[in-house]
Amino acid sequence: MSQIRVGTASWTDRTLIASGWYPPEASTPEKRLRYYARHFPLVEVDATYYALPAEQTATTWASRTPDDFVFNVKAFSLFTKHPTRVAALPTDLRASVQKTGKDRVYLKDVDPEVTDQAWERFLSALEPLRQAGKLGAILLQYPQWFPVSRANKEYILSCAQRAAPRRVCVEFRNHTWMTEDNQAETLAFLAGNKLPYVCVDMPQGYPSSIPPVLAATTDLAVVRLHGHSGKWDSKDIYERFAYLYSDDELKEWASKIRALAGDAEVTHVLLNNCCGDHAQVNARQLADLLGT
């Protein structure tokens, strides 16, 4: 069985801080990260989706966590064809983008030179984590409007090549990748290119819904548990991800994760039901069930 690491998709969320999960003495960003890292061996950084990180920030993350702690990092929104705030780009990269007259732009709106620079700065900023051996995988979460196609497969490969030798993992939000007809081909494509598939648990019945298929396509398996909020289509992330897994649900997932771990060397499990302390509570419960 592989090494199983369980963590959450945030340690800085304002609702988590307000929930009381952190003790009063964990009153600064540094103290909160150190406290979190005493309880979990893995965390996912989602702030990097909204803005390019700074190298100094990654340096402090590395220095404030144990030697065996791991950060998975979500790719900047521009790279995965999500709408990106122009204001989120570094000042010197905004000029050509501002010509569009838009507050938010897509990859197709941006000059390739700007995209190249954004990638270079993103990867450079993560270098302190990589040098410290603490960079797990870069999460490439593709949007609902990114269906299965040859062109999109080629784009996934181009992102992985840009990130190399850093590892990426791939999460889909368009159901066509994992329909009964396409599922085997999608997993074979990922396995053939040594790309970890991100297994998900999420509400079903939406265009973005991916079934809870557990599959290891490389020696790294990744699971993200998003919960089952009845407001999955809400634009409010706290409504969308507000869900507390029951004991029975977690026991069922622990059994599935053990089976998945048999096909991988390392398994990362991230609780992304980040509303208040839900993710931290469920992550601790699941870790206990898995004996990690």
Image: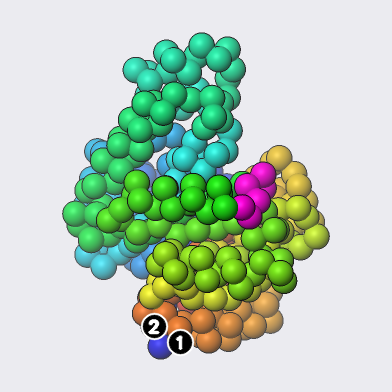
Identify which amino acid the numbered label 1 is placed on: Gly
Residue at 40% x, 57% y is 168
| Numbered circle sitting on residue 7 | none
How did the renderer colour the structure?
Answer: rainbow
Residue at 67% x, 44% y is 145
- Tell me whether circle 2 and circle 1 mark residues in contact (CB < 8 Å): yes
Identify which amino acid the numbered label 2 is placed on: Ser
Nearer the observer, 111 or 98: 111
Callout 1: SS? loop
Nearer the observer, 231 or 15: 231
| Numbered circle sitting on residue 262 | 1
Taking 275 as reference, is 157 left or right?
left
Location of the C terminus (image quadrant): bottom left
Give coordinates of residue 62: x percent, y percent.
Answer: 25, 53
Q: Which residues are magenta?
A: 144-149
Callout 2: SS? loop
Residue at image mark 2: 2
Nearer the observer, 40 or 128: 128
Location of the N terminus (image quadrant): bottom left
Give coordinates of residue 15: x percent, y percent.
Answer: 57, 47
N-terminal label among 2 and 1: 2
Residue at 60% x, 56% y is 172
